[in-house]
Image (tube, rainbow, N blue to C red):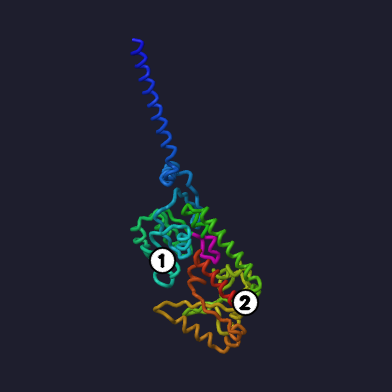
Amino acid sequence: MYFQSKKMLTVLVICLTLVISACGGGAGNQAAGPAASSSPTASQSAESTPADSSRTIKHAMGERTLSGTPERVVILTNEGTEALLALGIKPVGAVQSWYQDPWYNHIAGDMKDVVVVGDELQPNIELIASLKPDLIIGNKVRQEKIYEQLNALAPTIFSEDLAGDWKINFSLYSRAVNKEEEGKELMEAFDHRVEEAKAKLADKLDSKISIVRFTPSQVRIYLKQTFSGVLLDQLGFARPASQDKDDFIEVLSKETISSMDGDVMFYFVSETQEDNEASKVAQEWLEDPLFKNLEVSKNGKVVKVDEAIWNTAGGYEAANLLLDEILDYFEAN
């Protein structure tokens, strides 16, 4: 009896040990899960605690509380498209570029399968609705009249305006798509590039830089609050007295053609493949005796540049390319 009882006790102890080991093994497997694949765990955590990523966005049309990271974003400004791409977000729909239809050359490679939803001035609301967006980003200056229609489709965030400092809107967009920290890092990286360029160009910064735009109907000088003007100011370049103003543009006539003068004049032409009228205007002005009498013309410092990079794209990628072009020119001249 004693032997049998002892034998039974031994069996019970072994069984109990196996049960305890199995429980311990299960706990060990759960702890090892995140090390093997952190993405599913991060996704589950975000879904179970949405308050962690909830944020209230103050924008041009009021306030909006958003949760999580959007997956189907429609963007209604060109500079906003560049912001999303820089943040690693490919929109499901975007307005077409002003030139180089449908996308600017410098972003075309990243825009495969993105649906064109009209242009900044006239987005296609029905097409936007068909894309089933979970976030729409637009601009008050361009689309204020259709805000309520857009907001009925999906949470809609509007920037206030389209000023020259792209970083103002970039900051808003990065918060809207739940990428605020990534946005800060990108802006800091850009500012670091600017400081490096500023050091390289230290002996060139007293050059007075003129910026001119030719369109079919107008000739304009671009002042300090334009896209290119803001970067020139950040770099510390001088501007001609006629352009050294905290404003956007001034329209010229032949009588005020002297406002184009400077040590270097960068100009761009607003033209498309279908319409080259602006090029004819540029040729007429650049060959005018009044222009040829300007110091910048006599010194051969008149440089044609890409309007997309210097003016209309207006976003993160264009800002970096503009910085590259400025560096390249002044390091070579």
Disc 2 vs disc 1: which is toward the camera? 1
Indicate whether 2 appears above or below 243.
above
Q: Identify the amino acid type marked 2.
A: Ser
Residue 101: x percent and y percent?
A: 40, 71
Q: Earlier in the sequence, mark 2 or mark 1?
A: 1
Find residue 242 and name its label.
Answer: 2
Residue 198: x percent and y percent?
A: 62, 67
Whether label 2 touches label 1, CB < 8 Å: no
Task: Tell me if residue 167 is in the magenta stretch.
Answer: yes
Residue at x-position 52% and y-position 79%:
304
Of residues 16 and 50, the one nearer the viewer is 16
What's the CA distance linking mark 2 and mark 1?
Answer: 39 Å
Secondary element under disc 2, as helix, strand or loop, is loop
Residue 25: x percent and y percent?
A: 41, 33
Q: Is residue 34 left or right of residue 298?
A: left
Segment tinted magenta in the rendering: 159-169
Secondary element under disc 1, as helix, strand or loop, is helix
Q: Identify the amino acid type marked 1.
A: Gly
Q: Which residue is mark 1?
A: 109
Indicate whether 20 appears above or below 95.
above
Which quadrant would the N terminus be assigned to in this image?
top left
